[in-house]
Image: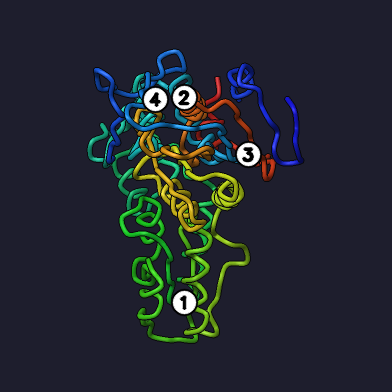
Amino acid sequence: MRYNNKYKPEISLDRMAGLYCDEDLYSLMRRAEQIQGSISDNANAPAVSQGATRLHLEKVILAKPRGFCAGVERAIEVVELALQRLAGPIYVRKEIVHNPHVVNALRAKGTVFVEELDEVPQGAVTIFSAHGISPAVRDQAKARNLQVIDASCPLVTKVHVEARRYASEGYAILLVGHQGHDEVLGTTGEAPEAIQLVQTVDDAKQVQVANPDKVAVITQTTLSVDDTKAIVEVLKRRYPKLVMPPKDDICYATQNRQNAVKAIAQEVEVVLVIGAKNSSNSIRLTEVAEDAGRRAYLINDASEINPAWFGGVRSVGVTSGASAPEHLVQEVVETLKRLGATQVEEWELVREDVSFGLPAELIQASP
């Protein structure tokens, strides 16, 4: 590996495979047949055709940090260890993380995914997803005598604790987030009578509370840092005594991945974000790239790449959301190489060393 500056290690193409071990669908341009399905490994990556579009791709810049955060790694490990240590079947309420590749891989190992607990047999082992749950769901699990393992991200749990504390102290709580997201549903359930959802700057300008001197704000962990800042600034102007958590609710991984995208956006013309269409943090990464003035595309995997995006483009940035496996990044890089890219760089903005311990229920089940 050659380093051309502190943050830009240049990686020779023949070493890529060794170094990276650690639903709107876009169609590929066709030659004779359409590529179908997802990709399981680099050897099976789809053939691509430049068709009538003349491509001049030269460079791919990989953002780092990217991909799995500590909360996602923990949630996936919880499911895999439960499969190994506990008598099955193992049920998971909702997607364990928002990525179909992860969900399908765990399903193939025997995991049963359900939308609600009434689909789970009495007394069965049930895992709660990384996005957190409301007290009502926990009560339902208890009523059904389920063997519960909570894989909620500790950073989401932190927001739940804040919601309960502010509610108990009589605050009106403004939750900055997106309606319908699993994390928002869980947080709102902690104090439904006290929480109002604020999704936009306009919402922040219009929301009303009973006592303007007794207002607190909390946020969904996976929002855009910039979008959250704009909303909170409006709330501060309207409510000068606004109370905020002692530490920002936006999680470290969300912020790091957004900062990395901002960095590579200064050097590339197009940004590819690998992540599911229902992944909030992946959507935010796309928006961050667009806010930096770059065309950005959210793709589930390499099969969704459209070569027409790269007409006249010489450099492409690649990142992945916090629930996207690294092998999907490798497959995208291989596809871009077949489209002409001859140079791959990785820009590491910050090194992450965060890890979370396993839930007590799983530790107690150790063989």
Say whether disc 2 or disc 4 marks the residue closer to the N-terminus: 4
Q: Is residue 357 above or below residue 208?
A: above
Residue matched to label 2:
331
Q: Amino acid at mark 4?
A: Leu
| Contact flag, marks 2 and 1 (Cβ < 8 Å) | no
* SS of the residue under disc 4: helix
Q: Position of residue 279 (x, y in %)?
A: 39, 45
User: Residue 301 at x, y = what percent?
Assistant: 39, 31
- In what element is the residue under mark 1? loop
Q: Taking 254 as reference, is 39 left or right?
A: left
- For residue 106, the mark is 4
For label 1, the residue is 171
Residue that label 3 marks: 355
**Tag 3, which secondary structure?**
loop
Closer to the eye: label 2 or 4:
2
Q: Nearer the viewer, mark 3 or mark 1?
A: 3
Residue depicted at x 60% and y 24%? 20
- The residue shown at (41%, 58%) is 187
Question: Of the residues shown, which amino acid type is indicated by label 2?
Answer: Glu
Mark 1 belongs to which amino acid?
Answer: Tyr
| Residue at screen point 48% across, 49% down | 285
